[in-house]
Amino acid sequence: MAGTGVFAEIFDGEVYKYYSEGEWKKSSSGKSVGIINPTTRKTQYKVQACTQQEVNKVMETAKTAQKAWAKTPLWKRAGLLHKAAAILKEHKAPIAECLVKEIAKPAKDAVTEVVRSGDFVSYCAEEGVRLLGQGTFLTSDSFPGNERSKYCLVSKIPLGVILAIPPFNYPVNLAVSKIAPALIAGNSLVLKPPTQGAVAALHMVHCFHLAGFPKGLISCITGKGSEIGDFLTMHPGVNCISFTGGDTGIAISKKAGMIPLQMELGGKDACIVLEDADLDLVASNIIKGGFSYSGQRCTAVKVVLVMESVADTLVEKVNSKVAKLKVGPPEDDCDITPVVSESSANFIEGLVMDAKQKGATFCQEYKREGNLIWPVLLDNVRPDMRIAWEEPFGPVLPVIRINSVEEGIHHCNASNFGLQGCVFTRDINKAMLISDAMESGTIQINSAPARGPDHFPFQGLRDSGIGSQGITNSINMMTKIKSIVINLPTPSYSMG
């Protein structure tokens, strides 16, 4: 169970502790933040409400620990990461339990997230050894007008202190996707988990603690965003911010100053369906892409743009599959579980009511009980409806009928977002041309959008983010280039 056994020291019987200087601590504030179970809508857990003074202490120790860690051989860094990965997978059950209770993630998906996180850490350790174990050697005579009198040794060095801020929907996996690259690259790491998902993240951090990482290298600080959010992101001790979430990231990017940013801020992933598409394949991917984890995924299908000639057939096929979706609590491994909060449910309902008022066709009756919203396919959606453009982060999917491929591409590119998209057709030439024209970070051909496998690049355009993720790209962005130039008294041609 969560907070027991090897995890007993992170819990004082009422409130979960925060992690600093290699120890689990109670905040001097004496205050806590409640975490509401989306299913019961009652307080499930409490975490420490840390103070700005505690943030300062974490940053101070992170800076000191990083200096020593940067001198640790790569193979030793990798070894500790492999150990943490094994511990994480060994204790998948209590961490998955937290995910079920904190964010209403279906039980089987919760376990999958933890195992995937362990695999990510191990792969990152191996990739880091390969990537960072080699540099570049340049000679000056390759540039016109120079003799071979200078040798340039180029290597990657760590940035310093990385601030990682993952989202509620993958609080473990999208935390380790920041932690592992930072550590293998020689950085220290300060984690600010989301409130919903914080306890799962604390359990995950304890796995790194058990692996034996140096004190102060990893910290996990919890609290109210209104009290420590800006203080963290604007802290002079932070050398890089990796953030996954929503509009907050735009505000962070404006305040962060001259430091590298890695931001993934959501999407309105479009699914373009041509006349020649395999409609059974399309329908299956719309269900998987649009409704898994109740649509609470940045890479969920968020709008279907289907050619008018096949729209009726596709909608019928999707409706038959929607009817088979199991709705209920996450403990029962239901397909559709409660959305993360009442405010989220209210926002989704606002989009649905706007569509209803403006004449969208409801393929299912809209039904809501607390935070639980039954899946709804909205047909005949028009561009003047909010649901055509806004990201619902819920089990509501709009269908827009189009009369040309160009119309679909235009709708995709007119969005403020540009994370992912997909196109379904049997014609690979059309698929390539449409993919090229869609202005999104990744386009999937004949499959729903997805983040992963985790070594694939993952990035967005426009309001969907800054920079690129994926294991190799994350390691690279958490390092900087350093050059050392050897100046010879006379040209030499014995090297290079």
Image (cartoon, rainbow, N blue to C red):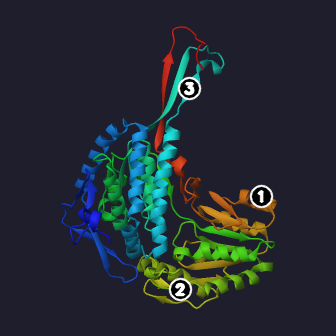
Residue receiving disc 2 = 374
- Considering depth in this image, is 456 or 258 the residue closer to the camera? 456
As drawn, the label of residue 137 is 3
Residue type pointed to by label 1:
Leu
Residue at (54%, 47%) from the top-left corner? 472
State the separation of the CA atoms marked 1 and 3: 39 Å
Image quadrant where residue 187 sits: top left
- Considering depth in this image, is 494 or 419 the residue closer to the camera? 494
Image quadrant where residue 272 sits: bottom right
- Residue 263 versus residue 481 in the image, above or below: below
Q: Position of residue 279 (x, y in %)?
A: 75, 76
Q: Is residue 120 left or right of residue 310?
A: left
Residue receiving disc 1 = 433
Quadrant of the image containing the N terminus: bottom left
Mark toward the start of the polypeptide (2 vs 3): 3
Mark toward the start of the polypeptide (1 vs 3): 3
Quadrant of the image containing the C terminus: top right
Residue type pointed to by label 2:
Trp
